[in-house]
Amino acid sequence: MSHVKNTELAEYGRMKIQWVEEFMPALCAIRERFKKEQPFAGKKITMSIHMEAKTAFLALCLAAGGAEVHATGCNPLSTQDDVAAGLDSLGVQTYAVNSVSAEEYRELLVEALSCKPDLIIDDGGDLLDLLSGDYAHLAENIIGGAEETTTGIHRLHARAKAGVLPFPMMNVNDAKCKHYYDNKYGTGQSVWDAIMHTTNLLVAGKTVVIAGYGYCGRGIAMRARGMGANVIVTEIDAIKALEASMDGCMVMPMDQAAPLGDIFITTTGCKDVIVKRHFEVMKDNAFLSNAGHFNVEVNAVELEAMATRVYQRRKDIMGYELPDGRTLNLIGEGRLVNLAAGNGHPAEIMDTSFAVQALSLEYMLKNGKNLSKAVYEVPKAIDDEVSRLKLAGAGLQIDTLTPEQEAYMEGYTV
């Protein structure tokens, strides 16, 4: 039995899904092949991804391939209730409601898994956590699955190393067509879209502190510099820190950056990146936000304990007034800011990521029973297919090597 907030929102949800479809040519091409070949016929798929329009279209593509799809969110604040209602009205059983409690969120995940799926798509590892623990009995039919976040992949590798991964999983996050575009260009745009829309304030001239210089951090820094911000990067990796410096960013520890920043954005996937000692020295009206999957990078518990007053200042912005009169602003509860306070990545970006997801799930269906319980990299053939589909959809062409050039590149004398 589906579980959405308000079925009367379905019409606008369907409109949003139809809008993104127009800008996702690679996934459209895969959907057409799935319709003809029906690779998922008779199979059940549970997917836990941020419940918004692009995700809904992925679910519909899998359903077009014959799957019985059960969809839920992966973050209590990222679900768009109109999209959840719209997707449910289109035949995908949907279990997603915005702003639920932690317990209610867990119950929605369990509802989505109660079908005992054959395949899963996870985002952050919450499904796998349930299937490895109290709800292991719901995993009895699972062939394998796919995970698309840095945080989720960390959790997968930890389970695999400990020998407790219950079934094979595909590392979609590290596919070239995912992290090159999604993490860098998608995050770079959508994080700033959310912050700018939520605050309605200028970026130019401000000092932006970005914790972590992986692909997400690079994208956020690139856009910040382009809008005229002064960018500081904090890192634990010397190579990434050196790259940030060569890209024109200042590099320093968070203890040094804390008094300087106007806007803070964490992108590490780790916990306690910004904590009490940093809050104690920040500027009045500094903004705190997180672009990592879980709300543990900015320690909001310590911030609240310090505050003499906590109050809502704007939609998705909570003010924390400190004893000395300063106020610090937390955006989107410290959850994934581009979805908790925004619309997520652009449709053109998620086209490549979700195309990789769809093809990885097809691969897992065909091969999963012969794979050990480990984490697998996306085959190069899938990356290549998605990139070709994306180029074709954009009306772009590339060169090809002549036989003589191929021989030369292989080391033969021509």
Image (cartoon, grey):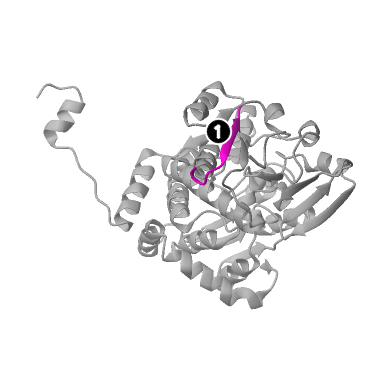
Q: Quadrant of the C terminus?
A: top left
Q: Quadrant of residue 399?
A: top left
Residue 231 is covered by the magenta coloring: yes
- Give the residue displayed 70% in from the left and 69% down from the top: 5
Q: Position of residue 223 (x, y in %)?
A: 50, 45
Observer-nearest of 288 and 380: 288
* Residue 1 showing in the rendered view: no
- Give the residue displayed 63% in from the left and 31% down from the top: 158
Q: Amino acid at mark 1?
A: Tyr
Q: Quadrant of the N terminus?
A: bottom right
Observer-nearest of 54 and 203: 203
Q: Residues within 10 Å of mark 1 (few under 14, many from 20)?
A: many
Residue under pointer 1: 213
- Give the residue displayed 60% in from the left and 54% down from the top: 196
Q: Quadrant of residue 14?
A: bottom right
12 vs 379: above or below: below
Helix or strand or loop: what does disc 1 sit on? loop
Q: What segment carries the magenta color?
A: 226-235
Q: Position of residue 18 (x, y in %)?
A: 47, 70
326 relative position to 298: left or right: right
Q: Position of residue 147 (x, y in %)?
A: 55, 44
Observer-nearest of 254 and 205: 205
Residue 21 is covered by the magenta coloring: no
